[in-house]
Amino acid sequence: MGAATVLALGAGAIGAIALLGEYTTGMIRTTFTAVPARRAVLAAKAVVIAGSTAAFGAVVAVASFGLTQGILSGRDSAVGFGDPAALRLLAATALLAPLSALVGMGMAAVFRNSALTIVATITLLFMLPSLLSGRQHLGATILHMMVLPAWQRLTFVDTEGTPWPWTTTGAWSVLATWAAVATGLVVLPWNRRDL
Amino acid sequence: MRRVHPRSYNQRGHGAAPGPYWWAMVVSSASRLYNSGWQPATRNCHPWTDLRDTPRRHDQHMIEVCELTKQYGKKRAVNNLSFTVHPGQVTGFLGPNGAGKTTTLRIILGLHRATSGQATIGGRAYRDLPRGLRHVGALIDAGDVHGGRTAEAHLRALARSNAIPRSRVNDVLDIVGLGQAAGRRIGGYSLGMRQRLGIATALLGDPPVLLFDEPLNGLDPEGVLWVRGLFQRLAAEGRTVLVSSHLMSEMELTATHLIVVGRGELLAAESVDEFAARGAGRRVTVRTPDNARLTSLLSAEGASVETAEGASVETAGASFTVTGLGADRIAEIAFAHRIMLYELAEHPATLEEAFMELTSGSVEYQAGGDR
């Protein structure tokens, strides 16, 4: 869980910086003068960042899974790559990186300011889920809409039983919604503002 | 009396809606955040052509600014500004600091949205072009670069985005004299070197239209000379060259046409010769033993009289300066009243003076007097 948080925050920062680097230096004006089609520029950036962080996330997920299984196989409790739960874990962890990067990028597109963007990204990805409690219905409902809890639902085996269970499909759709909204923030309305 | 354009919707002041209409406040702040205020229907400066449907009927490389208005909050940066910039000549875009030059250039390049009115290049809004460098080259701010990149990497990325061959990057770097520094990070460049890089960026796509915002800032004398020659060459090749500046002296040696703005409004749009004719021959130095009589006679004719600092107009023998009357007329008056003249010299007003006179009413950030 701690490692996933670090992965998410790191990828979020990378995504944010990919856009902030242009806004804070003024380079964005040169870029948009060279290519007036703003949506195309921002979509290309989103694709590149999502692609590279996805590759990074996949390497991290496979490497750490392989390593743990190597250790666990010596103790006779390995799972193996073929297990459906293991595949789900690998996929969810690999996708956590590009998703967080898109969230960071979306915040950068909205705020265009380093401090605000980083605070917003950390709040959305990390602060809110750790502040909320899953015991009450309301808290659980909000928690189930956050990125890291959804990732947790997809990767952890529920042993003790939670008062508010939810399906893996639900968790996948939460992640998909975050990705869609973040991409929308990067590409759709905000890019029409003055520079 | 300020003329208020009927289409300037922002004048109504949505935010000032009285009463408990909180939702109206929300809507108004949302629309302000969106920063477009309102996008009114496009108005045509040229009723005989439709800018939207038949862009080809326009001169391909003409910049047209049409009833342009830009409002930032309460501040109106550009007010109902209209002008055209033609190809084949260097056009100087002049005005005091804060006159709205940079705002206008940014709107032309689609970086800012106009509150009302429009700006087009070759009949099209720049923002509608998919790729820009082959159509328009621009230097808006030399600091608009990523300091961590080398000049070469910076230009290569821009060339790549516009499908410009790689070899062109080294060509333009050599043109602006940065060939030696191409592999160094831009962050370590001086202002003059950044200006040169900005000019290289503008030239990258070999565009027919070029915009430069204060390109001479920070350049060494050799660079200034070179840039002047470059602009004239570019114009001689039939390109449209628009160069903004707040210094008339820079422009009178470079430009053949001038657009002068002050407080966001158009003050003059004419050739340099016409502009120079505005103030020519208006200043005359006069020295006479009979100051008191001559000055009162000249004042009666509608001229204004100024003395050198510290001297009174009545001091006999002290020279004074007359504006508003030609030397011929002053001589006639003196002769008719049998006043002796020791000196009568006419000074053609410089462009600088004509510029100062024209913009004196619209200088926004005026320094206090001598302290």
Image (spheres, rainbow, N blue to C red):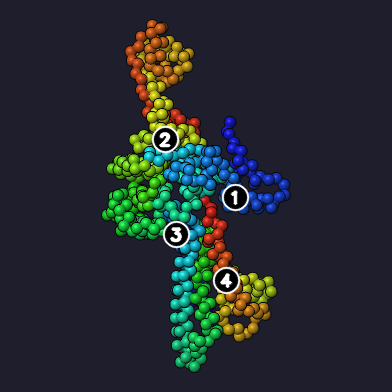
Q: Secondary structure at mark 1?
A: helix
The disc placed on residue B258 is 2
Q: Amino acid at mark 1?
A: Arg
Question: Which residue is nearer to you in this view: B54 or B88?
Answer: B54
Task: Tell me, yes or no, whether dots 4 and 1 are on the same chain.
Answer: no
Asked if marks 2 and 4 touch (Cβ < 8 Å), the reply is no
The disc placed on residue A21 is 3
Residue A71 rendering spot, x and y as whole percentages: 45, 88
Locate residue B288: give its quadrant: top left
Please report, as a chain letter, where disc 4 is located. A
Q: Is residue B276 visible?
A: yes
Please report, as a chain letter, where disc 3 is located. A
**Alpha carbon of mark 2 to alpha carbon of mark 4: how far?**
56 Å
**Alpha carbon of mark 2 to alpha carbon of mark 3: how far?**
37 Å
Question: Which residue is nearer to you in this view: A163 or B63?
Answer: B63
Q: Secondary structure at mark 4?
A: helix
**Alpha carbon of mark 1 to alpha carbon of mark 3: how far?**
26 Å
Image point (31%, 57%), residue name: B167
Q: Secondary structure at mark 3?
A: helix
Question: Which residue is nearer to you in this view: B200 or B86?
Answer: B86
Q: Amino acid at mark 2?
A: Leu
Which residue corresponds to mark 4? Answer: A176
Which residue corresponds to mark 1? Answer: B32
Image point (66%, 72%), residue name: A141
**Going by the picture, which residue comes out furthest to the left?**
B180
Disc 1 crowd, CA 10 A, few/some/many (<14, 14-19, 20+): some
Residue B117 rendering spot, x and y as whole percentages: 55, 42
Quadrant position of the C terminus of chain B in the picture? top left
In this rendering, the label closer to the viewer, 4 or 3: 4
Asked if marks 1 and 3 touch (Cβ < 8 Å), the reply is no
